[in-house]
Amino acid sequence: MKMHYEKTIELHCTDTDKELIAEVDHFKEKVHLDAYIANNRIRMKWNGKVYVGNSAGLEFTSDGPIMHFEKQGRI
């Protein structure tokens, strides 16, 4: 069984209470990830519950990318 993660995540801005979609790069589960919005990087770190990052004076949180499992070989 092979697992892979989606290339996008949903970010929640805690200051404005809005949701937005960002691209994911350099993801390490329960450690950190880089989220990109309009070529701006938001470095997010795992705090034990969610990923948290700051950009332009705003705080963003995310549960991280969704994981998918893919069966390999004979079925």
Image (tube, rainbow, N blue to C red):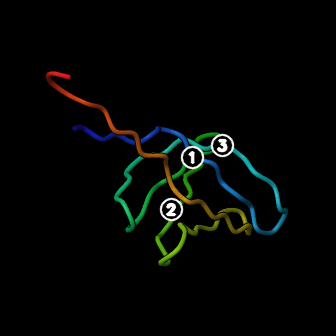
Could you tell me how far apart the alpha carbons at marks 2 and 1 are, in whole angstroms? Answer: 13 Å
- Going by the numbered disc 3, the residue's amino acid type is Ile
Q: Label 3, on which residue? A: 21
Question: What x and y, as percent, mark residue 54?
Answer: 63, 67
* Residue depicted at 65% across the width and 54% down the height: 11
Tag 3 near tag 1, CB within 8 Å: yes
Q: Quadrant of residue 32?
A: bottom left
The residue mark sitting in front, 2 or 1, is: 1
* Residue depicted at 39% across the width and 67% down the height: 30
Mark 3 / mark 1, whichever is N-terminal? 1
Q: Label 2, on which residue? A: 43
Could you tell me how far apart the alpha carbons at marks 2 and 3 are, in whole angstroms? Answer: 15 Å
Residue extending furthest toward the right: 16
Give the quarter of the figure containing the C terminus.
Answer: top left
Question: What x and y, as percent, mark residue 9?
Answer: 57, 46
Secondary structure at numbered mark 2: strand
The residue mark sitting in front, 2 or 3, is: 3
* Residue depicted at 85% across the width and 63% down the height: 16
Tag 2 near tag 3, CB within 8 Å: no
